[in-house]
Image (tube, grey):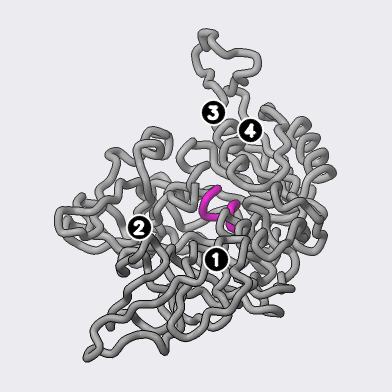
Amino acid sequence: MIEKAPSCEDPSDPGLLPVAEALQRIEKVLPQSAFNQPETVDLKAALDRILARAVHSAIDVPSYTNSAMDGYAINSNDIPTAAQGEKTLVVKGTAWAGRPLQEPVLAGEAARIMTGGMMPEGTDTVVIQEHVSVLEEGTKVCIDATVEVGRNVRFSGEDVEQGQVVFEAGEKLGPAQIGQLASLGIAEVDVSRKLKVAYFSTGDELRSLDEHAGQTLAPGELFDSNRHSMAAMLAHMEVEAIDMGVVRDNEEDTRAAFTRAAEIADVVVTSGGVSTGEADYVTKVIHQLGDVAFWKLAMRPGRPLAFGKLGDAVFFGLPGNPVAVMVTFYEFVRPALLHMSGARLKQTPLMSAICQSKLKKSPGRTEYQRGIVSLDTQGQSVVSTTGKQGAGRISSMYAANCMIVLPPGSGTVEPGESVLVQPFFGLI
């Protein structure tokens, strides 16, 4: 009788490391090397970078009390009562954005004011131009009792107060953060330096597009797609990516590639060679050169995933199947790179959706099935799979806009049941 060894076809294997525990182990090992070695960059070059130091505001924003609308600035004491009905005010002048009205507005007076214009002395309320009657060619204006005290006024410091901590260290700088920093008069920021990430594919069967694009492949040969997927995924992150090409399936070349990668990079990411085949040299060489924290996970796709240290460098050995490469990158490598850069948010939040497909699964491992999430006619989030979920079907990734995350304790999901969904928006 054949004594079968554990494999990725088994519904579960108690010897495999759960995903949650693997993530915890990774975070304990990772250095925050980039975060602890900041660099100063121009604000125009700071998009998607991670703040290395907290930012305090040296000014109030807005720096002066101003109008939020085009209209007329008045003193709220001039608002008529319901019994009075309406009241006519004399227009004193105009307050333009950047050109304040120098004279104070007295009782019984108003000032024409434009959006962003400084509120004249003596005013505390803006009546929008659509809610007044303009009289005598604009020299007078009539208001009524519906005017609200303090309406349409932006007060000095209401957005940001002087001395306030605007952003904590670890904030990822998006367009809104860049705009806020500019409003504070900040032209340069201290950010985590870009991590150096070396990556390569392994396999005698792989043919590089640099040399073989458009050629007919021999039997058993494949174009190297994983390296291009890794390059594209790294391009979505603020890192310095170092392409080391294709490494052949032999111990000498594998050792040389790892030795070189560990010398020049903070992180080394590979695809292929981490299973138990006779030609899978990655794990063997890593055991010789460094420390391996784990290499088999209770997940699908992505069971053979190695993680460890190569000297000062961190190592991720991703599987060889295209979908498994992308799933393990997003679930493990991406959070690790963010952590090393000091980012506070590392994992993309999950959302609930009603599943419209039957999802076959056995308890014991975490599964990441590719799906399409949308809103039904009632505005409820629903999700269905992209079809066959084989780890070699890269079409299941580009046809999807999310991953359906099935936890270890769950079994087969029937249509109508609620599932957790990880949207690609913010992830990819």
Mark 3 → mark 1, Cα distance in angstroms = 62 Å
**Disc 3 crowd, CA 10 A, few/some/many (<14, 14-19, 20+):** some
- Please name the residue shown 60% across and 19% down the image: 209
Mark 4 → mark 1, Cα distance in angstroms = 65 Å
Q: Say which residue label 4 marks.
A: 201
Front tag of 4 and 3: 3
**Disc 2 crowd, CA 10 A, few/some/many (<14, 14-19, 20+):** many
Indicate whether 338 appears above or below 392.
below
In depth, the one of 198 and 303 nearer the eye is 198
Point out residue 10 in the picture as x, y percentages from the top left corner: 38, 51
Task: Residue 310: give its label.
Answer: none
- Looking at the rendered structure, the kind of residue marked 2 is Val
Q: Say which residue label 3 marks.
A: 225
The tag earlier along the polypeptide, 3 or 2, is: 3
- Looking at the rendered structure, the kind of residue marked 1 is Ala
The tag earlier along the polypeptide, 2 or 4, is: 4
Front tag of 3 and 1: 1
Mark 3 → mark 2, Cα distance in angstroms = 26 Å
64 inside magenta stretch: no
Q: Say which residue label 1 marks.
A: 95
